[in-house]
Image (cartoon, grey):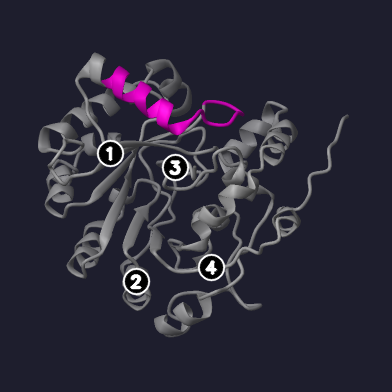
Amino acid sequence: MRTTTIAPFASRVQQEGTQLKRVAIDTVQVNVGKLCNQACLHCHVEAGPKRTEIMDRQTAELALDFIHAAAPHTVDITGGAPELNPSFRWLVEQARRDGRHVIDRCNLTILLEPGQEDLLQFLATMQVEIIASLPCYSEENVTKQRGQGVYEKSIAALRRLNAIGYGKAGSGLVLNLVYNPVGAHLPPLQAKLEDDYKRELGTRFGLEFNHLYTITNMPIARFAHALQRDGKAESYMELLASSFNPTTIDGLMCRRQISISWDGYIYDCDFNQMLDMKVGNGKPFRLGEKPAAEFVRLLQRREILVGSHCYGCTAGAGSSCGGALQ
């Protein structure tokens, strides 16, 4: 069997004469749990309807204490389907009361679930930015990743979002979509694909949105299992490593972001969280075990924990929770 030696990511970055350290905490991303009404092929969280890992109110309060201490511009709430967490709306309300910009990473179909009838109005009232996953504008590709019937529900949810003002010019209600590749390849150019999405969704359904974010599928968790099953794990890692783009390093999200897990541990990013790469000096940092301000101090200018999966964020045009880096 052919094997290829891939340089450790840290070594590859050092070859560029730099070192990955945090420069600020502009965003605190809070993963409130792995419970979801979907189980998508590319999901690096391995979320699904049977997952029981859910952030409790005490941990949500500790996360809010950390947000107060860090004073980020943005609070980015994710899951699973974050809206299924009983503390989701409370966390949104508290963050907005403090003047933070709040993002809800929404899978769209949650807006149609029983018990969520008033969710859309709540998000609009709170002026929450919605970043919604729609892996493709074609039904076939969405079905491959997310299952039968998801495409129709996603379109129905987008229609409801547009009807209340989301994605409409001048409304102040921001709706951004996310594209993930179907399979083991890099995303196409973000600007070009955004034009395609706007043309196809506009022409076929009359839908509007603000921007499209392309995100590289990370070789971890559920997607990694699929790569191994199909015998593509090695070739995909080779693709990521050979597509390393040093000009993406400065914009990597880990340099300006902190990720908090459902059980209160602190990570450099959401991907590290799913690989259990906890931040800490020999002992993982966990909310409540030190004053929040002390954690913030310790995280300043701290070196980022990296692994081979980090090639996914530096390949081609780069990738982050906010889309391509270039």
Find residue 64 and report its horizontal and vertical position in percent: 32, 71
- The disc labelled 4 sits on which kind of residue? Arg
Q: Residue 4, located in which quarter of the rendered image?
A: top right
Residue 293 sits above or below residue 169 on the image: below
Residue 207 versus residue 123 in the image, above or below: above
Sooner in the amino-acid sequence: mark 1 or mark 4 = 4
Question: Which residue is at 64% across, 49% downward?
Answer: 246
Which region of the structure is painted magenta?
182-201
State how far apart marks 1 and 4 are (Cα).
34 Å
Quick check: 176 left or right of 251?
Answer: left
Q: Amino acid at mark 3?
A: Gly
Q: Which residue is mark 4?
A: 22
SS at mark 3 in the image: loop
Q: Nearer the viewer, mark 1 or mark 2?
A: 2
The rendered magenta stretch, by its main secondary structure, is classed as helix
Give the left or right position of residue 181, taking residue 177 as reference.
right
The disc, 1 or 2, on the residue closer to the chain's N-terminal end is: 2
